[in-house]
Image (cartoon, rainbow, N blue to C red):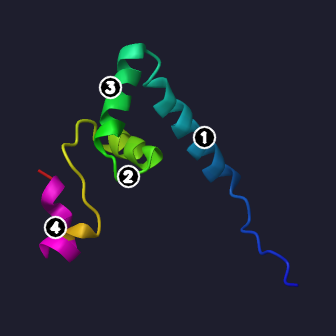
């Protein structure tokens, strides 16, 4: 049996990830903010709650998102500079 290969632990990256998680969690410290998040997550039924929450943290109020369906169903390509003004 082959032993599992483990990636070396990057403590700096781990601390930065934890810091980001705590910062994001602090945004939802009121009932109104949490209710807004739950309503947002509920609109994205085809995404896991975790992924919908990630969408919310990156772009609160996003009306829709689409992944590989852009190319497959709509034959569209995402322009890299489209979100920049």
Say whether residue 12 is left or right of residue 6. Answer: left
Camera-nearest label, 1 or 2: 2
Disc with the residue nearer the chain's start (1 vs 2): 1
Front disc: 2 or 3: 2
Q: What residue appears at the point 80 percent right and 74 percent down from the top-left corner?
A: 4
Residue name at image x 76 percent, y 69 percent: 6
Residue occupied by mark 2: 47
Label 3 vs 4, first from the N-terminus: 3
Q: Secondary structure at mark 4?
A: loop
Q: Position of residue 53 (x, y in %)?
A: 41, 41
Task: Name the residue located 20 percent from the left edge and 68 percent from the top edge.
Answer: 70
Image coords of residue 31 (percent x, y): 41, 15
- Per the image, the residue denoted by label 3 is 36
Q: Which residues are magenta?
A: 71-83
Q: Which residue is mark 4?
A: 79
Q: Are marks 4 and 1 in contact (CB under 8 Å)?
A: no
Q: Is residue 11 left or right of residue 24?
A: right
What residue is shown with label 1? 18
Q: Nearer the viewer, mark 4 or mark 2?
A: 2
As measured in the structure, the alpha-carbon distance from the residue carrying label 1 to the one carrying label 2 is 24 Å
Was residue 55 drawn as part of the magenta stretch in this picture?
no
Residues at marks 4 and 1, CA–CA distance in whole angstroms: 31 Å
């Amino acid at each position: 049996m082959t032993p599992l290969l483990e990636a070396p632990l990057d403590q700096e990256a781990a601390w930065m990830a934890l810091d980001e998680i705590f910062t994001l969690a602090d945004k939802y410290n009121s009932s109104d903010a949490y209710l807004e998040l739950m309503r947002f997550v509920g609109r994205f039924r085809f995404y896991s709650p975790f992924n919908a929450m990630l969408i919310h943290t990156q772009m609160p109020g996003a009306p829709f998102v689409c992944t590989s369906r852009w190319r497959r169903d709509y034959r569209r390509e995402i322009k890299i500079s489209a979100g920049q003004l």
